[in-house]
Amino acid sequence: MRTEDELIEAQLTEALRMIAERAPQHDLLAGLAERRRRRRHRRARAVLAAACAIALGWGVAATWPSPLRPVLSAHGPRTDGAGPDGSATDGARTEGDRATGLPSGAGREIERVWPDAMVTIPAGYRPLAAIDATRLLVRHEPGQIGVYDVTTGRFGAVFTPPADMRALTVDEEHAAWLSKGWVWVAPLRGSGQARRAGRVETGAAGEPDRLALAGDEVAWSSPLGGIWRLSLSGGEPEKVPRSAGLQLAGWPWATDEPLALHDNPTRMVNLETGRKVTIRAAYGVEGLRCGPTRCVGTRGQDTVVQRLDGRDVRVRKGLREPGYRDRFFVGHQGVYDARADRLVSFAPLTQWSGGDGVIAWRQGDGLRVVNLAAVPPAR
């Protein structure tokens, strides 16, 4: 009979094999063999878990500053080091504007449907996340991360990101991230400083890859390590009871998300009340990844958005998971608003970049930004 560590390593190896079948350019199995030759088995398992998290798209695994900026286009993702529109940062108009001869921003449905969510910011900032309807978390070109107030145009530095920062998350009061085995927290208001809140448990279960702010606490999870939480004021982290096998899906919700790309989860759990909701995939849908009320998966070549119970199935090509606030799903054609059941088009825009609740493209001498936190409630 195999030991628990051997079972964990077998699970990780199988997950990497499935990832390699869908994305052979990553050569993850070759990397696994090399790690085994160079590291102890315990260290290799932790690294492999982190590799699983990144390759499967678990959480925000961004590294800042990065030599590459992820750029999305109507033809799929790019990482070519270009600006948000895929061009040199020379203030040129977008490819869509050039192709149509339209004035900057003219003719885009998204501009007409959500005018209150649209803002132009200086080109020296890169939007990372929506904080609320008037504030964005941005990275300033010199290397600082801070808050940009769209009503005043003022930027307030919050912290300088470490090279290994990952799983960055925000709420209206704090930013939190993982770095060098620690959870870091920084206030978004006032003059407080970034500080280490607590040590993150690692080991055979792998590095944490999802982070969530929950009032006066911060919580995190890893693919095989369950869910942990810690007071923002510090102290010792505590494992959330009955969280084994669960991954965060937006506090206080967690799901039994499988390692296999094509498999579907079976339940959503409220970590505060213990309530369990059964997840049922609509006919033929696989690879579901779920938020508190909605899931996105695939059926053949189509992307499917559905409720947890398998109802309200909507087929929308080219959407990416996960959704923002369990409502907005960004894709190659635009933003699908699940509550309004409407796909809001980017056209004639062809290239853009995105973050958590933000979408941006170069327009004139600045960046045009969609702040999804500023979109009014669906009617």
Image (cartoon, grey):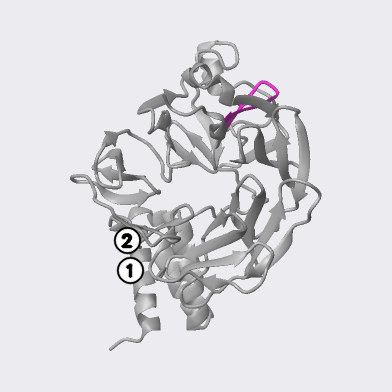
At 53% from the left edge and 33% from the top edge, which residue is drawn?
372
| Whether residue 4 can be seen here | yes
Majority secondary structure of magenta residues: strand
| Above-or-below relation of 35 to 59 | below
Task: List the residue tagged with mark 1.
Answer: 14
| Three-letter code, disc 1 | Glu
Q: Which residues are magenta?
A: 359-370
Name the quarter where the N terminus is drawn: bottom left
Residue 260's disc is 2
**Which numbered disc, 2 or 1, marks the residue that appears first in the sequence?**
1
Relative to residue 151, is residue 206 drawn left or right? left
Q: Position of residue 220 (x, y in %)?
A: 53, 63
When the figure is inspected, residue 225 is found, relative to residue 331, above or below; the finding is below
Name which residue type carries label 2.
Ala
Q: Is residue 258 left or right of residue 77?
A: left
Q: How many other residues sit within 10 Å of disc 1, few (<14), some (14-19) or many (≥20)?
A: some
The answer to which image quadrant residue 327 occupies is: top left
On-image quarter of the C terminus: top left
Decide: is 325 above or below 242. above
Residue 255 occupies which quadrant of the picture? bottom left
Q: Residue at x 34, y 79 (%)?
A: 7
Residue 259: percent from left, percent from top: 35, 63
Q: Is residue 199 left or right of residue 96?
A: right
Residue situated in front as seen by the camera: 234 or 362: 234
Dots 2, 1 in contact, CB < 8 A: yes
The CA distance from mark 2 to mark 1 is: 8 Å
| Rendered position, 307 above or below 57 | above
Q: Is residue 357 magenta?
A: no
